[in-house]
Image (cartoon, rainbow, N blue to C red):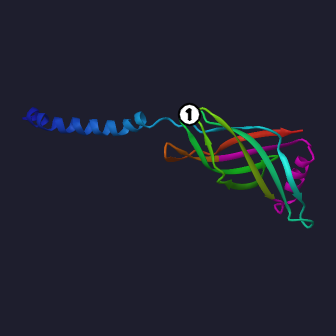
Amino acid sequence: MFFLTLRRFLPTVLFTALALTLSGCIPGLVAPIVQAPSFSIAGELQVLSFEPPLIGRGQVVMRLPMQVYNPNAFELSVTRLDFDLLVNSRLAITSSTTQGLTLASQGNAPFVLDITIPLQSGSQLIADIAALTQGQTTTYQLDGSVTANVLNAIQVFAKTTLVSSRVN
């Protein structure tokens, strides 16, 4: 009696097990593994304008030239970059850009990021930015998460350090 019951339900159990297994495995087999684009510094950090508080707008505008590489075997379009800029390990600004960039399969392209930093955040930030603009020993780091259009699907890559450097 037990074997007759088992024999009757065995196809249902096997079908359910197979369906659960395939539903978990097929996305991994069908969807390609997408790697985040990598960023590197492509020139010196430039100060476009520096307006101290009380004299001007109280902001500095900096240009960070970078090179972006697509390690994937398919085209990828960067659609958004959410970032934090740290100067001497202090947060200077949290911002984002929707400046678009399309990268060919395993290709690279220049990416210029203009960053406006308000200087109302405190005297230490002003001193750090002033040191940076005067070429004194200073470190900066750009942490960010990249949003990209990958094969007509939006992919948001986890926040990581995109570039960092020491200016002497």
Is 131 part of what is drawn in magenta?
Answer: yes
52 vs 158, left or right, is right
- Residue type for callout 1: Asn
Image x and y of residue 98, in percent: 64, 54
Left or right of 136 on screen, residue 19: left
> In terms of depth relative to the viewer, which is nearer, 118 or 152?
152
Quadrant of residue 67 in the image?
Answer: top right
Say which residue appears at 37% left-offset and 38% top-offset. Answer: 24
Residue drawn at 90 percent across, 52 percent down: 130
Q: Is residue 73 left or right of residue 14?
A: right
**Residue drawn at (83%, 41%), measured in percent from left and top?**
44
- Label 1 element class: loop
Q: Nearer the viewer, residue 9 or 104?
A: 104
Quadrant of the image containing the N terminus: top left
Q: Is 54 or 78 nearer to us in this picture?
A: 78
Identify residue for label 1: 72
Q: Position of residue 3 (x, y in %)?
A: 10, 32
- Answer with the quarter of the image where residue 18 lies: top left
- Residue 11, placed above or below residue 92: above
**Which quadrant would the C terminus be assigned to in this image?**
top right
Check if residue 84 falls in the magenta segment.
no
In the rendered image, the vertical position of residue 139 relative to residue 105, given as above or below: below
Start-end of magenta stretch: 118-144
| Residue 2 location, quadrant | top left
Q: Residue at x 58, y 44 (%)?
A: 77
Residues packed near mark 1 inside 10 Å, few (<14), some (14 to 19) or many (20 plus): some
Image location (x, y in percent) of residue 21 = 32, 36
